[in-house]
Amino acid sequence: MTEKTNKRDGSRDFDFYVGSWNVHHSRLRERLVGCTDWEEFDGTSTAFNILGNTANFDESTMYRKGGQLHGMTLRLYDAKSHEWSLYWAATGSGQLDIPMVGSFDTLNGTGKFYAHETHQGQHVYSRFIWSKITPTSVRWEQALSVDGGETWETNWIMESTRVS
């Protein structure tokens, strides 16, 4: 017996991010050590749809005290699983990070994406949340969990405002 599912087409979920953005970053200086000291810096991001509007790409510049950092995110939509895979790469890495996989909840407009990775040799869960989405602003945050997702330490927050 086959179970019928009525999953929605989420292939346009990142359309809200197409365009140019000013970004304010708050980044925890040290992760998973009880640190409460945050680094604040600004940046920019420009995003556009690719692959017939079923994928999304952005390029970011971050202006940190130690110099500029460049990064990019490739977001690919899987029409079968109805999930996105988000791949990040930054200046000097030479590779795409493992994908964060997830989707948007249409009831609250929040996107949640997860991966299992290592941080300083320790296996951790990682999470991205896209929230507070309006036509002119959006919030993104990253968190890590060392206890299988029971608790999370948020270590990076980006508040983006659309460039008019």
Image: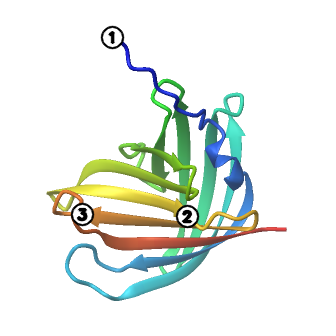
Contact check, label 3 and label 1, Cβ < 8 Å: no
Q: Residue furthest bottom?
A: 37
Residue at left offset 19%, top offset 62%: 120
Q: Secondary structure at mark 1?
A: loop
Mark number displayed over residue 1: 1
Mark 1 / mark 2, whichever is N-terminal: 1
Q: Are marks 3 and 2 in contact (CB under 8 Å)?
A: no
User: Which amino acid does the dot numbered 2 rest on?
Assistant: Ser
82 sits left or right of 101 in the view: right
Q: Which residue is mark 3?
A: 145
What is the x, y in percent for residue 84?
49, 39
- The N terminus sits in image quarter: top left
Of circles 3 and 1, the one toward us is 1
Residue 131 disc label: 2
- Three-letter residue code for mark 3: Ser
| Distance of label 1 from label 2 (alpha carbons) | 38 Å
